[in-house]
């Protein structure tokens, strides 16, 4: 089995302040959302990715550009 690894979901878009919805994978409540907007726990998404390698259902946030001091 290939382990994909942990998702980087640092963006605030992954948290829905309007309330919990059932996770599409385990059914338990979660405020977390995938990029597609579907409610899913991060750990459930990571487990799904591990079980379904090569798919794009759940993916990481793009890397952030670093800001250096003194640059504009």
Image (spheres, grey):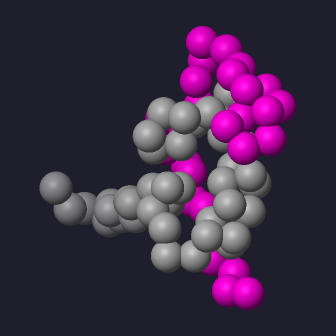
- x then y, percent, for residue 57: 49, 55
Answer yes or no: is residue 12 visible.
no
Residue 10 inside the magenta-drawn segment: yes
Work out which residue is located at the far left of the displayed protein and give it: 72
- x then y, percent, for residue 39: 62, 33
Answer yes or no: is residue 27 visible.
yes
Please name the residue shown 68% across and 61% down the image. 48
Judge from the rendering whether residue 3 lies leftward or rightward of residue 72; answer left or right: right
The image quadrant where one finds the N terminus is bottom right
The image quadrant where one finds the C terminus is bottom left
Asked where in the image residue 17 lies, by quadrant, the reply is top right
Does residue 37 sit above or below 41 in this rendering? above
Q: Nearer the viewer, residue 7 or 46?
A: 46
Q: Nearer the viewer, residue 38 or 64?
A: 38
Work out which residue is located at the far bottom of the displayed protein and give it: 1
Q: Main secondary structure of the magenta part?
A: loop
Q: How many marks?
A: 0
Asked where in the image residue 69 lies, by quadrant, the reply is bottom left
Judge from the rendering whether residue 20 lies leftward or rightward of residue 65; answer left or right: right
Please name the residue shown 20% across and 62% down the image. 71
Judge from the rendering whether residue 22 lies leftward or rightward of residue 34; answer left or right: right
- x then y, percent, for residue 36: 44, 40
Does residue 2 sit above or below 7 in this rendering? below
Q: Which residues make up the magenta segment?
A: 1-29
Please name the residue shown 72% across and 44% down the image. 25
Work out which residue is located at the far top of the displayed protein and give it: 18
Please name the residue shown 72% across and 34% down the image. 23
């Amino acid at each position: 089995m290939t382990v994909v690894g942990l998702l980087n979901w640092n963006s605030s878009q992954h948290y829905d302040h309007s309330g919990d919805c059932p996770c599409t994978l385990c059914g338990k409540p979660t405020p977390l959302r995938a990029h597609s907007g579907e409610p899913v726990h991060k750990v459930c998404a990571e487990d799904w990715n591990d079980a379904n390698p090569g798919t794009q259902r759940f993916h990481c946030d793009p890397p952030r550009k670093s800001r250096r001091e003194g640059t504009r």
